[in-house]
Amino acid sequence: MAVAVPVQEAYAHCQQVTRAAAKNFYYAFITLPKPQRQAIYAVYAFCRVCDDIADGPAPVEEKALRLADVREALSEAYQGKPRDTVFTALAHTVQAYSIPQRYLDEIVRGVEMDLTVRRYQTFEELRLYCYRVASCVGLVCTRIFGGSDPKLEPLATDLGLAMQLTNIMRDVKEDAAQGRIYIPLEEMERFGYTPDELGNGVLNPAFAGLMRFQAKRARGYFASGMRLVPLLPWRSRACPAVLAGLYACILDRIEAREYNVFQGRIRLSSREKLFLALRIWLRTALPWPSRSAV
């Protein structure tokens, strides 16, 4: 039986979840006005619920049942009958910002893909996964940002793709250790690099060429996705600009390392994130696009 939780208490819980787990996102979220910031925390906490199920130690069958239960809880939240603290905040958010349920349903579907899909043959297959787990989050956030221009949806989609592709490049080693390969097998074959080499952390010209190709694709999506920033209300612009800046900086470092993602995780320090967020926030305060946010 659901226990009623005051909305502000629910938002405070979601903020705690975000602060503890959102290593990059939190620095972008703090640029938003409080109501939007709280809404973003609720969305992030919902995504965290899904990810924690997928990443947990339970058998695949149990994870699938738990994600199906999340989908049911999501429907109940849209009916104004939230089950718990996270869904209380989420129910308030989706109503306040008119967020379509299909976006959140797609996020759950994307997480479900991780239960059974270990490799992707083509980029089109991978793109669907990235759309669900990243672009749909961006589409939800765009509603919260207050943008109404019809051009926003494809641009938000592209920015989500750019960020997820950067994640994939950075996390190649960790994913391979779990038996997952997110770089399309078709492209690996084209560059002459094998799954066994990936699993063994082989760094050679074929791998560098493969990663250079992935980076170029991500850069293209960043360039397209950043076009959404000037279409947003001024007060919301810094958030997506900071997010893009943080991930673009990670991509810069991958390239500067000559794509050696096998020796130590590429990351930004808390100080670097804060400095970058401040610098980008100041740039978005100037007339756009006379300054670049990335």
Image (cartoon, rainbow, N blue to C red):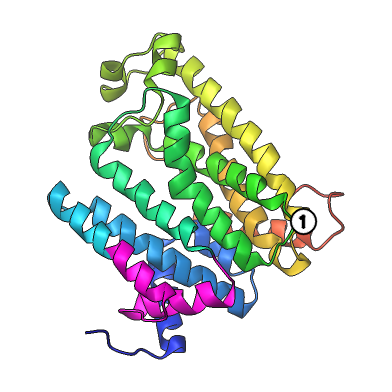
| Magenta region | 70-99
Label 1: how many residues lie within 10 Å, few (<14), some (14-19) or many (20+)? some
User: Residue 48 appears in which quarter of the rendering?
Assistant: bottom left
Give the quadrant of the N terminus. bottom left
> Residue at horizontal 21%, vertical 60%?
66
Specify whether residue 24 is painted magenta: no
Tag 1: residue type?
Answer: Leu
> Residue at horizontal 84%, vertical 60%?
286
Residue 214 position within the rendered picture, expressed as x and y whole percent measured from the top left: 52, 26
Q: Is residue 20 above or below residue 6?
A: above
Q: Main secondary structure of the magenta part?
A: helix
Q: Is residue 149 above or below residue 93?
A: above
In this image, 259 relative to 28: left or right?
left
In this rendering, the count of numbered labels is 1
> Residue at horizontal 78%, vertical 55%?
230
Q: State whether residue 137 appears in this view.
A: yes
In this image, 213 relative to 239: left or right?
left
* Residue at the disc numbered 1: 231
User: Residue 6 appears in which quarter of the rendering?
Assistant: bottom left
Residue 71 position within the rendered picture, expressed as x and y whole percent measured from the top left: 32, 62
> Residue at horizontal 61%, vertical 67%?
144
In this image, 217 relative to 195: left or right?
right
